[in-house]
Image: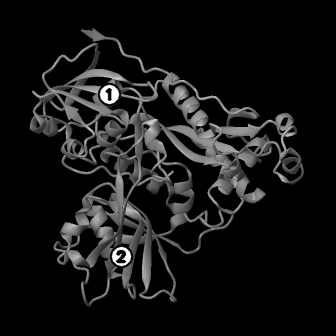
């Protein structure tokens, strides 16, 4: 029996006595300066991540980009009247930050995620999550997370996503690691395990003026985003850095070390770009760092790397911000040992809010029919769902009971990790994270659900 499905708002965890929460949009005043609340909030985020405090001039540049992204800022603040009754209240009053400086921070905003379906999905992106170490164990993180996920449910968003500094925190809120990136080190010397490609060059790579290239960067990324499962939309920071207008170490200055390469296809269109920085002559061996490489297709990606490896005096290329797990470069090399993996880590963590919309909007590998029973500690999307895939398109309905012999049970965190195709259902079975009825056919389920390539998220937030 089919039923209408609507995600449930999670219960919002209360804060400990003496703490209050406020959510407000990032804002600037009429003269273009950040308002006091936004300035104090951003400085608290930087303090939480052990970063230098932003100067007033830096905030004047940074906060307008948050406004442009539509960021909502949730801060948890100390009630000064309550604090005055505590033994530590006098010290806080005399030595602490002002009352607009939060002890917990949480930022969220709307973007799009490519799940491999016909159109990108709207998604709640979460960032800037900090809790002051002196105010832990007071329900701050749980309150901020549950209140903002509740808002995402009310807004009708099917997914939430974040990137994490600590991998043990967000699984309990239903987020599962869903994409990964590799760090590469490439030998560009003419000796040893040296770089050489199996194919002849296609098109031309040019070094161009970064300050003239914002339109091109946005167009190339848009093509990449449309064609890449796992990609999320980008914030304005990327265009400021890619055009050299912002030095990441001091956004009030131009980054005069930045160089920009573009791959021009044989038809004259631009298929990819690479933002690069030379690490300096004191670095041994001489190293070119790839800070951002976006290509609409594999050819442009490989041609940009070919050009980098051929640059005079460059002996090593690094991609510390990550290359795709299924990087075609590795198989294009004559000697695959010319490119070594230096790191492998998760990037995007996904939290399903509406399984019907989310599953109907993802890519599928084959036709099939099965049902999923999903458990959710926050109660947002718990239930049983029948999934029928035909012609690569899924129809999903909520049911009161299992309606197919192919029935599998999992929690919402596991569904988040499976969603973009980074891990197989068979791997999750071996990990004990999916169970099935005795009649279930694992091979058929895998053939439908699993995807042939890994997802790729090139955006950090």
**Residue 96, numbered circle:** none
The secondary element bearing badge 2 is classed as helix
Question: Which tag, 2 or 1, sits closer to the chain's start?
Answer: 2
In the image, is residue 198 above or below residue 1?
Answer: below
- Which residue is identified by label 2? 308
In the image, is residue 396 above or below residue 290?
Answer: above
Colour mapping: one colour
In-image side of 384 versus 112 (left or right): left
Looking at the image, the residue that sits furthest to the front is: 87
Residue 446, horizontal then vertical, whole percent: 15, 39
In the image, is residue 399 above or below residue 420?
Answer: above
In-image side of 61 versus 191 (left or right): right
Residue 295, horizontal then vertical, whole percent: 34, 58
Residue 335, horizontal then vertical, whole percent: 19, 78
Give the residue at x 23% y 77%. 337
Residue 341, horizontal then vertical, whole percent: 31, 70
Give 269 or 32, whichever is nearer the viewer. Answer: 32
Q: Residues within 10 Å of mark 1 (few under 14, many from 20)?
A: many
Give the residue at x 62% y 45%. 66
Give the label, 2 or 1, closer to the camera: 1
Residue 97 is at least partly visible in this image: yes
In-image side of 273 versus 361 (left or right): right
- Which residue is identified by label 1? 374
Give the residue at x 43% y 21%. 7
In the image, is residue 45 above or below residue 369?
Answer: below
In whole angstroms, how far apart are the C-alphas of marks 2 and 1? 47 Å
Total marks shown come to 2
Q: Residues within 10 Å of mark 2 (few under 14, many from 20)?
A: many
């Amino acid at each position: 029996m089919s039923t209408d499905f609507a995600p449930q708002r999670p219960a919002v965890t209360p804060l400990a006595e003496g703490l209050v929460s406020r959510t407000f949009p990032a804002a600037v005043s009429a003269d273009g300066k950040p308002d006091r609340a936004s300035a104090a909030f951003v400085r608290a985020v930087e303090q939480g991540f052990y970063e230098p405090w932003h100067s007033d001039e830096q905030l004047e540049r940074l906060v307008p980009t948050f406004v442009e992204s539509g960021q909502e800022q949730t801060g948890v603040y100390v009630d000064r009247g309550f604090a005055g009754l505590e033994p530590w209240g006098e010290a806080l009053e005399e030595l602490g930050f002002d009352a607009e400086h939060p002890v917990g921070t949480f930022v969220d905003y709307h973007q799009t995620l490519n799940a491999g379906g016909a159109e990108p999905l709207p998604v709640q992106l979460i960032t800037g999550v900090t809790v002051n170490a002196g105010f832990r164990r007071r329900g701050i993180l749980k309150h901020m997370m549950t209140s903002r996920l509740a808002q995402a449910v009310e807004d009708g968003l099917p997914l939430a996503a974040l990137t994490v500094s600590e991998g043990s925190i967000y699984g309990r809120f239903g987020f599962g690691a869903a994409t990964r990136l590799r760090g590469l080190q490439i030998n560009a010397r003419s000796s040893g395990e040296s770089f050489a490609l199996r194919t002849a060059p296609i098109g031309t790579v040019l070094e161009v003026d970064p300050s003239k290239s914002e339109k091109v960067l946005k167009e190339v990324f848009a093509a990449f985003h449309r064609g890449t499962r796992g990609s999320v939309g980008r914030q304005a920071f990327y265009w400021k850095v890619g055009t050299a207008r912002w030095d990441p170490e001091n956004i009030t200055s131009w980054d005069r070390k930045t160089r920009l390469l573009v791959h021009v296809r044989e038809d004259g269109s631009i298929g990819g770009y690479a933002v690069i920085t030379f690490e300096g002559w004191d670095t041994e061996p001489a190293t070119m760092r790839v800070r951002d490489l976006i290509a609409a297709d594999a050819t442009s990606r490989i041609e940009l790397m070919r050009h980098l490896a051929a640059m005079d005096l460059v002996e090593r290329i690094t991609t510390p911000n990550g290359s795709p797990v299924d990087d075609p470069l590795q198989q294009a090399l004559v000697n695959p040992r010319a490119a070594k993996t230096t790191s492998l880590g998760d990037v995007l963590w996904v939290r399903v809010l509406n399984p019907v919309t989310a599953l109907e909007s993802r890519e599928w590998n084959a036709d099939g029919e099965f049902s999923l029973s999903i458990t959710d500690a926050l109660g947002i999307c718990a239930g049983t769902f029948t999934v029928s895939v035909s012609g690569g398109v899924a129809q999903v309905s909520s049911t009161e009971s299992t309606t197919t012999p192919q029935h599998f049970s999992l929690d919402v965190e596991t569904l988040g990790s499976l969603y973009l195709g980074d891990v197989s259902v068979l791997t999750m079975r071996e990990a004990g994270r999916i169970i099935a009825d005795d009649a279930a056919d694992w091979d058929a389920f895998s053939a439908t659900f699993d995807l042939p390539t890994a997802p790729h998220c090139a955006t950090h937030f």
